[in-house]
Image (cartoon, helix red, strand yellow):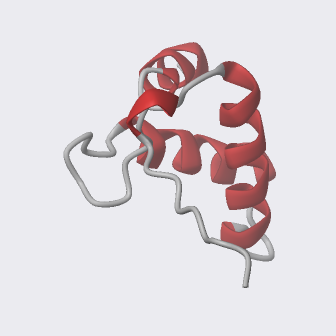
Amino acid sequence: MRSYLVFKAVAHVLNRYQLCQLVNKATRRMHRPNTRIPDTTNEVLRSVGDFMLGSVYAVKPPGEQKIERRLAA
């Protein structure tokens, strides 16, 4: 079951390392006392996997990201 969630989630993230970092941070923030950590991790993976690609918060490939450049004063 979890492998299905991982494969679905990795489609929305640039690489597996970023997916691990994202799931780690989200699991720590979303975890509630008296619940199992694997259940929270599955919930995070399900949320990332169901994330809409067209939304404002979707990850864009490196070539499409706008980099703001400022001139030195």
Q: Is residue 11 above or below residue 69?
A: above
Residue at x-position 40% and y-position 35%: 49
Image quadrant where residue 38 sits? top right
Q: Is residue 24 left or right of residue 15?
A: right
Is 38 on the left or on the right of 50, as rendered? right
Q: Nearer the viewer, residue 54 or 60?
A: 60
Image quadrant assignment for residue 28: bottom right
In front here: 24 or 57? 57
Looking at the image, can residue 17 be seen? yes
Q: In the image, residue 17 lies at what x, y percent?
A: 76, 27
* Left or right: where 44 falls relative to 66: right
- Quarter holding the C terminus is bottom right
Name the residue at 52% across, 53% down.
67
Residue 36 visible in the picture: no
Q: Residue 48's x, y, as percent? A: 46, 43
Residue 60 picture quarter: top left
Q: How many marks?
A: 0
**Residue that protrudes farthest toward the bottom in the picture:** 73
Where is residue 14 shown, x and y percent of the image? 55, 26
Q: Is residue 46 above or below residue 67?
A: above
Is residue 45 placed above or below 40 in the rendered structure?
Answer: above
Residue 4: x and y in percent read: 48, 16
Most distant residue in the left direction: 54
Figure check: 49 above or below 31: above
- At horizontal 38% and vertical 58% (from top left) the residue drawn is 57
Residue appearing at x 78%, y 49% in the figure: 24
Judged left or right of residue 49, residue 53 is: left
